[in-house]
Amino acid sequence: MPPRIEVADLAGVEAALERRRGQGFLLNFWAIWCGPCVEELPELLEVAHEARPEGGGVLGVSYDLMVAGADLEGMPATMARFLEKKRLPMEVLLFDADDYEGINARFSLPGEVPVTLAIDASGSIVDRQEGKAGRERFAEMMRRALGED
């Protein structure tokens, strides 16, 4: 099954979060051009896959359209090829807005990626990781998202 990729502004991100209400999941802010972001994705997705029976999951918010000269028309296909080549089965929202201020304010983001948030079934942020993390940290965050910790 090909990865689900859509272009979204802040309202689109909010709608995606609302669709997941009732589930615990990790929300990962990242970009293809961010080395630490790409390095952590396999372990993040392993943890999400293992948590699937309990309702856990992951949603990526890519900042790849937020760089000067980004190709709005071609980025969904570029992202799909990237995810398939790296064997990363994840849903990605390609964030597209005039600036980062709205999304950074909404999620208290530092402006740099990667950042991963643990979201519980009620939609609350119950944990956050700023900067690269590994399997153990993601597992801890997923437990919090699922209300197990």
Image (spheres, rainbow, N blue to C red):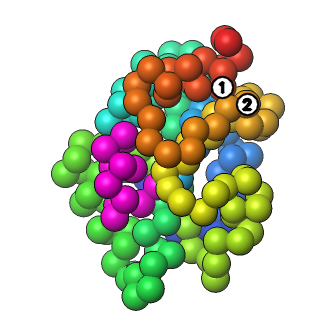
Residue at left 66%, top 55%?
109
Whole-percent x, y for residue 116 in the image: 56, 42
Left or right of 58 in this view: 45: left
Q: In the rendered view, would you say 31 is above or below 67?
A: above
Whole-percent x, y for residue 53 in the image: 51, 16
Mark earlier in primary sequence (2, 1): 2
**Residue 87 part of the magenta segment:** no
Tag 2: amino acid = Val
Left or right of 96 in this view: 148: right
Residue at left 37%, top 41%?
41
Q: In the rendered view, would you say 30 is above or below 63?
A: above
Mark 1 secondary-structure assignment = helix
Task: Please give the label number shown on residue 24.
Answer: none
Mark 2 secondary-structure assignment = strand
Q: Residues within 10 Å of mark 1 (few under 14, many from 20)?
A: many
Whole-percent x, y for residue 88 in the image: 31, 43
**Residue 32 part of the magenta segment:** yes
How far apart marks 2 and 1 lie (CA) works out to 7 Å
| Residue that numbered label 2 is attached to | 126
**Picture quadrant of residue 110:** bottom right
| Residue that numbered label 1 is attached to | 145
Can you say which quadrant of the picture contains the N terminus?
top left
Residue 20 in view of the camera: yes
Residue 93 in view of the camera: no
The residue mark sitting in front, 2 or 1, is 2
Q: Magenta segment range? A: 30-41
Left or right of 129 in this view: 134: left
